[in-house]
Amino acid sequence: MRAFITVISATLLLISSTVNAATKLEVTPAKSAEEKAVLKFTKPIADEFIALINKEFPLYKPMIVRLGGGEGPHFDPEKMEIAVPFTFVTQVLQRFRSPDAEIEGYMTAKEATRHAVMHVLLHELGHALVYDHDIPILGKEEDAVDNFATLVMLWHQGAEETLASAELFALFDLEVEEFSEAHFWGEHSLDAQRATSVVCLVYGSDPDKYEYLMGEQQKENDREGHCQYEYESKSRNWERATETARKLRKP
Ligand SMILES: [Zn+2]
């Protein structure tokens, strides 16, 4: 009996300590003036991201969010680390500053970059949650975590902020001159599909409010309410997949 009680208390101790595992920031020192400027721009985004993880999406294992250095953006399950190189943030900003960007008028290039980088971080958090919570994914994981990022942007930021990432995917799509086999073998859906998936979820969150996002053709394609169904089912599933850890986390 005593052994049983010991096992129980050891298990409780394990649970209480693991769900308390906080996500922390680590910064690779910025070397050039340009890297320092990117770090100054990106750190508040990372701070907001980490506060959101620790409040709403706690992980069982401790995780590091690393800014600067290395490759990425990616989530490395062995290191339990999300990494975002400085160069990636610069590339996003350059795309939003290109003449093809259609954000002019309602958002600056810097604001759009801030929101799109948050979407990228949330995409990587999606991978971290799938690994950490052992969430069953029946389909392309890249699509699943894109949806997660879009939903969290909608819940915690807003529709315009979320649409910045649709614009970024559309800008990536413009750079493709010709589709090769590699595009179809890729882990990710095509950039044009990633863009429309974001718009579909935003529209599906409130079809009356966001009717303006859909052209006549898209409305015709969505006549059975596919986007609204996608929004509702994906919201419910991600909520269910993350609620246990949220409940076990100590206040
Ligand atoms: Zn991914």
Image: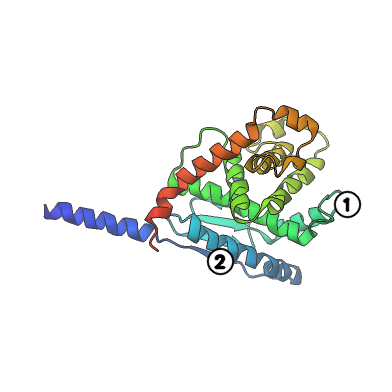
Residue 73 appears in view: no
In the rendered view, does 37 fall on the left or right side of 4?
Answer: right
Ligand 1 falls in quadrant: top right
Residue for point 84% across, 55% down: 104
Rendering coords of residue 194 (x, y %):
69, 40
Of residue 231 and residue 118, the one placed in the foreground of this image is: 231
Rendering coords of residue 111 (x, y %):
74, 60
Which residue was labeled with disc 2?
26
Residue 12 appears in view: yes
Image coloring type: rainbow
Of residue 187 and residue 155, the one placed in the foreground of this image is: 155
In the rendered view, does 241 fall on the left or right side of 160?
Answer: left
Of residue 149 and residue 30, the one placed in the foreground of this image is: 149
Rendering coords of residue 66 (x, y %):
58, 61
| Discs 2/1, front | 1
Residue for point 16% across, 51% down: 4
Which of the labelled discs sits on residue 64, or is there none?
A: none
Crowding near the residue tagged with mark 2, few <14, some 14–19, many ≥20 C-alpha atoms within 10 Å: few
What's the residue type where badge 2 is placed?
Answer: Glu
Q: CA distance from mark 2 to mark 1?
A: 35 Å
> Element type at marker 2?
strand
Which residue was labeled with disc 1?
99
Q: Of marks 2 and 1, which one's residue comes earlier in the chain? A: 2
> Element type at marker 1?
loop
